[in-house]
Image: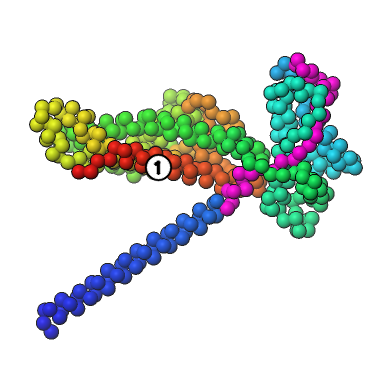
Amino acid sequence: MNNTVLVKKGLKKRYLKEKLFKSAGIVSIGIAFMFLLVLLTDVITKAIPAFTQTQVTLTVELNAEALDLNQNSSVDDIMQADFRQPIRDALKKRFDGVTKRNDKKQLYSLVSIGSEYQLRDLVLEDTSLIGTTLTYDFIADDDVDAVIKGAIDRELPESDRRVKNLKLSWIEEMETSGEIDTAFNWLFFSAGDSREPELAGIKGAILGSLYTLMVTLALSFPVAVAAAIYLEEFAPKNRFIDFIEININNLAAVPSIVFGLLGLAVFINFFSMPRSAPLVGGIVLSLMTLPTIIIASRSAIKAVPPSLREAALGLGASKMQTVFHHVLPAALPGILTGTIIGMAQALGETAPLLMIGMVAFIVDIPQSIGDPSTVLPIQVFLWADAPERGFLEKTSAAILVLLVFLITMNAVAIKLRKKFEKKW
């Protein structure tokens, strides 16, 4: 057998191996895509019900004497008035045959406990409603919501069903008459967290994430870019600089919970900074993100062609002018890519934020970076652990919002990168 035959035989084997490798790669990508599709389909399917809310239409009489109010009542008087009783009276009037105590308890649970606050807010907006009768859509209880959305099987025996026959008959009667319907759940985007699933919203977590990322970006981006420029363009080559570079690379691989412990020990215990605040969360996440942005920025600066520097220096520009007028703008797309990778990592982090108390149950919407708050990943964690069935769909909806948040950030980064991108 001569060499030509041997080479041809070897070529066939190499081509076969190449085809097998390509096929394995395509199959792997297909399997990964299939799992991603299954995951997204599952999340979206479970999240869709959270974007609608069941409402119960009731005709409520705002008796001025019973509420001890008049059209000139102050805000404090209105805040202290009992708006629960008019709603209960409306339910008793709608189903006037209910007399037993347990039956009344079931009847009152047709609407959420937050319905009295809906009524109070209506009166606060327009005091002329006092003394009148109005028809309004109140938020339904989470069990009623589950029945309407099909999460509770009406065909199950009463003993196996969370909603008893009597309450189910009221729900079906009101559903038939059009007094129960569903509408877009604006409360999910405009309210903070709550123990009641029908009242729980995500606004507090969205603003908490936004404030935390703003602090992270404001601290990590300028420091990381300045460090990268110095190390790549100005730093002398000696052992001390090598030691710093090695430590930066090592810090990028440190588990995130270590940064949480650092934040707890230094910022909260030593400097007495507020717990559960986006300010502390942002500082901790900026420490975690710094090595990622520094490494990406150094790679982007290193990728700028030396001819650009030489041309600028040859025309009389100083080293500082060469870096800030020519090298840095040319490296900006790569720096932005590294920054968005770091920010995306920060957005999904939970472990370091758990250590500084951002896992607390916080109802109020944060107004600044110093207010107690939580973030989207931790809100998902809290709702996933809640026993009420209504939080299952809220969890999936929060995951969907988190994904949209992340995709939006990536889209902005890609847009900026395309704008500043240059081809050499």
Question: Is residue 58 placed above or below 390 in the rendered structure?
Answer: above
Q: Which residues are magenta?
A: 45-73
Q: Report the residue at 20% width, 40% height from top.
A: 304
Residue at far bottom of view: 1
Q: Report the residue at 57% width, 53% height from top.
A: 45
- Residue 87 lies left or right of residue 344; in this view the side is right
- Residue 127 lies left or right of residue 21; in this view the side is right
Q: Secondary structure at mark 1?
A: helix
Residue toward you, 310 or 292: 310
Quarter of the image where one finds residue 264: top left
Amino acid identity at mark 1 = Asn
The image shows residue 85 at horizontal and vertical percentages of: 81, 30
The local crowd at label 1, few if under 14, some if 14 to 19, many if 20 or more residues have their Cα within 10 Å, is some
Residue at far left of view: 314
Q: Report the residue at 71% width, 22% height from top.
A: 126
Q: Is residue 122 magenta?
A: no
Q: Which residue is mark 1?
A: 410
